[in-house]
Image (cartoon, rainbow, N blue to C red):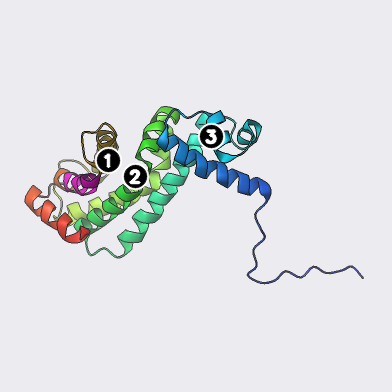
Amino acid sequence: MAAMTTQIPGRREAPSRADVNRRRILDVALVELLRDPDASMDQIARAAGVVRRTVYGHFPSREALICTLFDSAVEAVEVAHAAVREGAGGPAESLVRSTLAVWEIADRYRLLVALAQRSVMPQGIHERLAPVREASVDVLRRGLEQGVFESPLSATALAYVHEQMLFALMEAVNDGLLAAEEAGRSAVVTMLTAAGVPASHATELVAKLSD
């Protein structure tokens, strides 16, 4: 009679050495690229304690490595965006809370985003952000229908404007034109005013919801 293998419920198999190496390379690459945006694959391999061949075994090029890191950042943005939308009280509050949550992730990865814009085709970035953009369109559409927001643009067009505004504000922080500690709130106020909310009300709402 053939021996039967019993799997213990809830028990997870230990990750393989290859999986461990890949995770370590990604973790170290993020640190190295945020420290030095021009860090080479050799530098990343040395910092990760592996040979260059191991890095290329997981990522065929520097661009592929940056794309993988960018995908991780987008996934984190999607999770944060969805989590805060669920508990928001209305379109304006949803916009504030989701943008603050997204900015917290974006601020952590903003140098990486700048790298990705050089390494990932613009269409690729556009496609990766589609789920977050679609959720934003829903919030903006409800706000426009309820009169909370006012704009000559459709909800979809306004979502595109907001997306590009966030990228521009990240660049402003990277270039030293906007203080990082002020950027999150400034980003939300800017997006609210672009959606037709008076600046004074936008500032008060952001201050209230970010405390």
For marks 2 and 3, the one nearer the N-term is 3
Position above or below: 194 against 171: below
Q: Describe residue 119's horizontal placement relative to residue 208 as left or right.
A: right
Image location (x, y in percent) of residue 85:
31, 59
Q: Which residue is mark 2?
A: 106
Main SS of residues in magenta: helix
Marker disc for residue 44: 3
208 up-or-down from 153: above or below: below
**Is 200 a magenta residue?**
no
Crowding near pointer 2: few (<14 within 10 Å), some, many (20+)? many
- Where is residue 27 drawn, in percent x and y? 51, 45
The answer for how far apart the CA atoms under marks 2 and 3 are is 22 Å
Q: Is residue 109 left or right of residue 137?
A: right
In the picture of the structure, the residue carrying the numbered disc 1 is 166
User: Which amino acid, by three-letter code, is at mark 3?
Assistant: Ile
Q: Nearer the viewer, mark 2 or mark 3?
A: 3
Q: Earlier in the sequence, mark 1 or mark 2?
A: 2
Secondary structure found at label 2:
helix
**Where is residue 57, by image quadrant?**
top right
Three-letter residue code for mark 2: Ala
Instruction: Give the image location of residue 133, x and y in percent.
Output: 34, 46
Q: Residue at x 27, y 51 (%)?
A: 99
Q: Secondary structure at mark 1?
A: helix
Q: What range is drawn magenta here?
A: 181-191
Say if the magenta span includes residue 182: yes
